[in-house]
Amino acid sequence: MTDTKPLLMVDVDGPLNPFAAKPHRRPAGYLTHRMKPDCWIAQHPDTPERHVKPLRVWLNPAHGPALMALPYDLVWATTWEHDANDWIGWRIGFPCEQDLPVIEFGDQSVLRPDGTYFKTWTVVEYAAGRPFAWIDDQIDETDRAYVERHHTGPALLHHVDPRTGLTDGDFAALAEWAARVGAWNTSSPPPRRTAG
Ligand SMILES: [Mg+2]
């Protein structure tokens, strides 16, 4: 089987770009980038593109190798959508020639009647029952409850602090959860899910 590994849904702003850190104190290990991806330009519809101020992004080049070393299949789950492959992936150390799959979220301004984050329905739909972990700075108990009701496999909704970005503790939690999913794959029946 090719899909025995769980999926890892990866957000950019928060886990990879600790945008909420103190603005004049770049976190250790990060490099500063200034960029104007399409998703940023689209947020300034009334400003000519040449006048859009570049977005400052902090990225840690150790994060790509560390994510790739985890026993997951990686998927972008970010408002950057396809821009994540063009602007983010190679800067954190993903291979340039290998784009990650991208979850497309469509209109991000649509409010969900159940109060879930705008990504949550789409992430669950994308997973289609396959075990998945999700790292994001905007998931909460409402989203965990939705996943509990609508996802048939194990899932880990792992909140990452946007003041720090991914930490050693986050990577350890992801590795530990993947190991448990692997154990479930070899014993039946598996528990449906966990939250963390
Ligand atoms: Mg985010």
Image (spheres, helix red, strand yellow):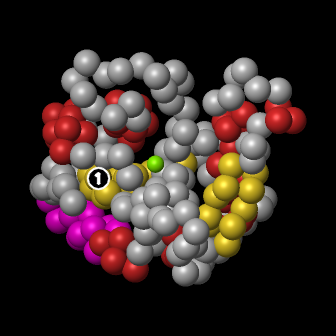
Residue 166 in view, yes or no: yes
Q: Main secondary structure of the magenta part?
A: helix
Question: Which residue: 24% across, 46% down?
Answer: 140
Q: Give the range drawn in magenta.
A: 174-188
Q: Depth check: give the residue in front, 61 or 180.
A: 61
x, y percent for residue 91: 71, 65
x, y percent for residue 118: 39, 31
x, y percent for residue 155: 27, 51
Q: Depth check: give the residue in front, 9 or 29.
A: 29
Image-quadrant location for residue 115: top left
Above or below: residue 172 compared with residue 133: below
Question: Three-letter amino acid code at disc 1?
Answer: Leu
Which residue is under mark 1? 157
Residue 85 in view, yes or no: no
Tag 1's secondary structure?
strand
Magenta region includes residue 15: no
